[in-house]
Amino acid sequence: MPNRDDIVAEARKWIDVPWRHQGRTRLGIDCAGLVILVGNSLDLINYDTTNYQRKTHGQDFLNHFRMNMDEKSITEVLPGDVMLFRDRQYPCHAAIVGGTPNALTIIHAYARVRKVIEERLNTEEWLQRRIICFKYRGLKN
């Protein structure tokens, strides 16, 4: 059964892959696609969806994660978890948490830089935009 380190290692394999809305290959991937393909590759999830807009309006993006992952407190986030972020008021961006419990990072397909990157979570931008945290179901620890 995979553990948190396996999730982070798998997510890091996607660093520098180009960003593409609703992409699901190494030719291009988006933030939700990264979470889905990492989970699929480790047999933690068995689903996919491309039924979302680039700029979400409402709770559909959030509900997709709620149906397929276990919600947890944002204050208890650990490497290997999935964090959602808002743009204005609605959730619209997902990232896999990396780093260590004392120095968290996020691994995400980021449209602004047009590729998958890993960066510090504790920047003002990301701390203000984070809204919810999830754990892959079936995770060992």
Image (cartoon, rainbow, N blue to C red):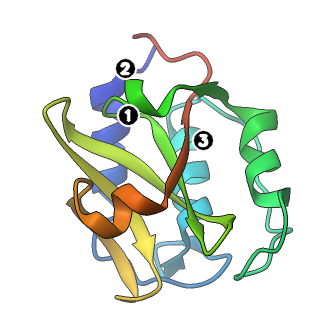
Of the two numbered discs 3 and 2 in the rendering, the one whose residue sits closer to the viewer: 2
The answer to the question of whether label 1 and label 3 lie on touching residues, with beta carbons closer than 8 A, is no
The residue carrying mark 2 is: 3
Q: CA distance from mark 1 to mark 3?
A: 14 Å
**Secondary structure category for the residue under label 3:** helix
Of the two numbered discs 1 and 3 in the rendering, the one whose residue sits closer to the viewer: 1
| Residue type at tag 2 | Asn
Q: Quadrant of the C terminus?
A: top left
The residue drawn where x is 58% and y is 30% is 43
| Residue type at tag 3 | Asn
The residue carrying mark 3 is: 40
The residue drawn where x is 79% and y is 79% is 53
Density class for disc 1 (Cα within 10 Å; few <14, some 14-19, many ≥20) is many
**Secondary structure category for the residue under label 2:** loop
Density class for disc 3 (Cα within 10 Å; few <14, some 14-19, many ≥20) is some
Q: CA distance from mark 3 to mark 2?
A: 14 Å
Image x and y of residue 86, in percent = 59, 65
Image x and y of residue 102, in percent = 13, 32
The answer to the question of whether label 3 and label 2 lie on touching residues, with beta carbons closer than 8 A, is no
